[in-house]
């Protein structure tokens, strides 16, 4: 949240951090959520409503553009996580609990996709508000072209779980169905669970092995109690041909972030790893995009509960891809 403020996005001010009581004190923002405002817009019409909606959509697009150009992915862009400050009518973005650092167009596109789905499900009566947001995003973001190209691909694919970091226990992750993709696909292997295509996953567990090749990669293993998941974190961004056409400043930021993650991953720590599901010598692994070292000893149990709840209520009821 503090990084978002440094990027010029309004967020609640952090007043204090109490390391003894484990509490944070934030500013209370007086004003309605964008969700409530848009729901009210759906019941009304007129020039005043259109003018205010244009203003809010413009603020949303500009804010997301600033976040993305600064390498910050919100992770949960919904209208519930946006407030309008009553005194100034300024947009305030909240709840960065799922945020992570990335400059990849795919991650930015998925961020926008989450917002598009939220608007479609909750505010379809508001018309083309997403188009207005994207118009403002184009003006705000310097890298808008690559991001919106990826967004178009995501919308065309539109698999309900494909671009989600699904929470899976190691046992489930290691038993995903692997299928060789067509030669025209950028991914040689695709993964599915009960017929639903998956591309990303999140796992939480103890780091039980660590093999570092400086400036090349870090291989490590996460043990969550049901099995061990192999993970790889690439550290070769500055020398890889894959990044040669990217903006040098962006590549340096990605490389610095990867080196930071590598330093955090130590034997015995509890880590949360999110990334792309890949295969190495026929074994499913995670190519890490985001790593968080957890301090709460209960986080593994909570992850187990999340995995079981999501499997029962979400993953097991998603219709297979056709």
Image (cartoon, grey):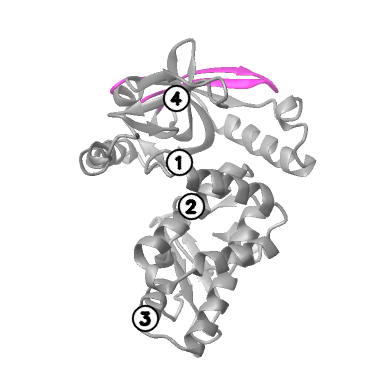
Mark 3 neighbour class, 10 Å CA radius: few under 14, some 14 to 19, many 20 or more: some
How many angstroms separate mark 3 from mark 1 (CA)? 31 Å
Q: Nearer the viewer, residue 71 or 150?
A: 150
Of the image marks 1 and 2, the number of the one nearer the N terminus: 2
Secondary structure, magenta segment, majority class: strand
Q: Quadrant of residue 255?
A: top right
Mark 4 neighbour class, 10 Å CA radius: few under 14, some 14 to 19, many 20 or more: some
Kindly check if marks 1 and 2 are in contact, taking CB atoms under 8 A apart as contact: yes
Point out the image quarter for the N terminus: bottom right
- Secondary structure under badge 3? helix
Residue named by callout 3: 40
Q: Residue 70: x, y in percent?
A: 66, 53
Of the image marks 2 and 4, the number of the one nearer the N terminus: 2
Point out the image quarter for the C terminus: top left
Q: Nearer the viewer, residue 19 or 279?
A: 279
Residue named by callout 1: 163
Identify whether 318 is placed above or below 124: above
Kindly check if marks 3 and 1 are in contact, taking CB atoms under 8 A apart as contact: no
Of the image marks 3 and 4, the number of the one nearer the N terminus: 3
Picture residue at 52% right of the left edge, 87% below the top:
87
Of the image marks 4 and 1, the number of the one nearer the N terminus: 1
- Residue 33 at least partly seen: no
| Residue lying furthest left | 312
Q: Nearer the viewer, residue 142 or 10?
A: 142
Residue named by callout 2: 113
Residue named by callout 4: 190
Picture residue at 69% right of the left edge, 64% below the top:
139
Picture residue at 59% right of the left edge, 29% below the top:
262
Question: In this picture, which residue range is highlighted in magenta?
Answer: 206-228
């Amino acid at each position: 949240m503090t990084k978002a403020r440094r990027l010029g996005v309004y967020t609640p001010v952090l007043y204090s951090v109490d390391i003894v009581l484990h509490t944070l004190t934030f500013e209370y923002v007086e004003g309605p959520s964008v969700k409530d405002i848009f729901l009210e817009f759906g019941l009304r019409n007129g020039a005043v409503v259109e003018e205010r909606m244009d203003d809010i959509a413009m603020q949303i697009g500009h804010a997301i553009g600033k976040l993305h150009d600064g390498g910050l992915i919100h992770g949960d862009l919904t209208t519930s996580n946006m407030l309008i400050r009553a005194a100034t009518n300024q947009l305030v973005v909240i709840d960065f609990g799922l945020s992570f650092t990335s400059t990849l167009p795919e991650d930015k596109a998925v961020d926008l996709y989450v917002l598009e789905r939220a608007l479609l499900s909750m505010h379809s009566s508001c018309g083309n508000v997403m188009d207005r947001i994207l118009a403002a995003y184009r003006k705000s973001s310097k890298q808008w072209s690559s991001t919106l190209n990826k967004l178009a691909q995501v919308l065309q694919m539109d698999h309900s779980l494909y671009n989600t970091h699904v929470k899976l226990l190691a046992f489930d992750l290691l038993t995903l169905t692997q299928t060789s993709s067509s030669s025209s696909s950028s991914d040689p292997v695709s993964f599915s669970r009960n017929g639903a295509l998956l591309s990303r996953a999140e796992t939480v567990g103890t780091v039980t092995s660590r093999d570092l090749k400086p400036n090349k990669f870090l291989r490590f293993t996460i043990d969550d109690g049901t099995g061990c998941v192999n993970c790889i974190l690439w550290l070769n961004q500055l020398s890889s041909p894959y990044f040669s056409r990217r903006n040098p400043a962006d590549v340096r930021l990605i490389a610095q972030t990867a080196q930071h993650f590598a330093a955090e991953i130590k034997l015995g720590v509890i880590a949360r790893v999110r990334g792309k599901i890949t295969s190495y010598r026929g074994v499913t692994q995670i190519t890490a995009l985001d790593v968080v070292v957890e301090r709460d000893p209960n986080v593994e149990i909570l992850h187990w509960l999340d995995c079981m709840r999501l499997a029962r209520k979400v993953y097991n009821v998603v219709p297979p891809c056709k």
